[in-house]
Image (cartoon, rainbow, N blue to C red):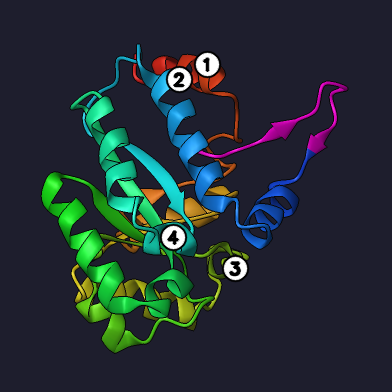
Amino acid sequence: ALMRWQRPDGRTISPMVFIQAAEEEGLIVSLTKHLFSLIEENVRAWQVTAPFHLGVNIAAPHLTDRSFTADVLRLWVSLDPAFRLVLEITERSLVEDTETASAKLNELRQKGCQVAVDDFGTGYCSLSLLQSLPVDYLKIDKIFIDSLTSAGADTPVLDTIVALSRRLNLTTIAEGVTAAHQVDWLIKNHVAYIQGYYYGRPMPADEFYMWYKGQIR
């Protein structure tokens, strides 16, 4: 679930701009709560096939906020049982207060939510920390997918990340996939989930639902 800002005159404000501004001005928690409300409204009438993964990005200040668990559970109970809510946490968020993060994420996982480490390989997460945290998915950052420049490309770092994820019993998700040879490599190397422009670009919720219904016929 991605947030976009389109002005009345048709111009758009980049998420890189308004999300960073929200973080700097102490508004990111309010913005995320607004996103949750939009999601509830958008998907209320959707009929989806289980498990339908719904990923939401969680900012570090929200993870440590006292309202975090209640905010997520409010969204979770509003969803049809076919939905699988995945909380996408950056490595930086997990490192800042590991004990608090682990306790909250464990509680939410016990309720049925799942957790993904987002943009893996670009942050600060140590391997020992990753092994001890309550995580279900490892999202491989686009920078490593881009190393798949051809079908026979040598990708030692990507190979290592996929192998590490398997050893830790984590499900891998490849981000930013744009080409058929990348898809072929990822399938061959047993990467479970693939996302990116190869399948579809970000689109408004109603357009996405129509696209989704067309895919499952």
User: Disc 2 marks which amino acid?
Assistant: Asn
Q: Name the mark on residue 216.
A: none
Image depth: mark 3 or mark 4 in front:
3
Coordinates of residue 67 in the picture (x, y in percent): 35, 50
Residue 215 is at least partly visible in this image: no
User: The residue tagged with tag 1: helix, strand or loop?
Assistant: helix
Image depth: mark 4 or mark 2 in front:
2
Q: Nearer the viewer, residue 14 or 68?
A: 68
Coordinates of residue 157 in the picture (x, y in percent): 47, 81
Query: Which of the two labelled residues, at mark 3 and mark 4, occupies the earlier sequence position?
Result: 3
Q: Are there few (<14), some (14-19), or many (20+) residues within 10 Å of tag 2?
A: some
Please give left or right for residue 168 compared with residue 190 in the image.
left
Residue tagged 3 = 143
Residue tagged 1 = 206
Q: Which residues are magenta?
A: 1-12
User: Disc 3 marks which amino acid?
Assistant: Ile
Number of dots carrying numbers: 4
Q: Name the mark on residue 185.
A: 4
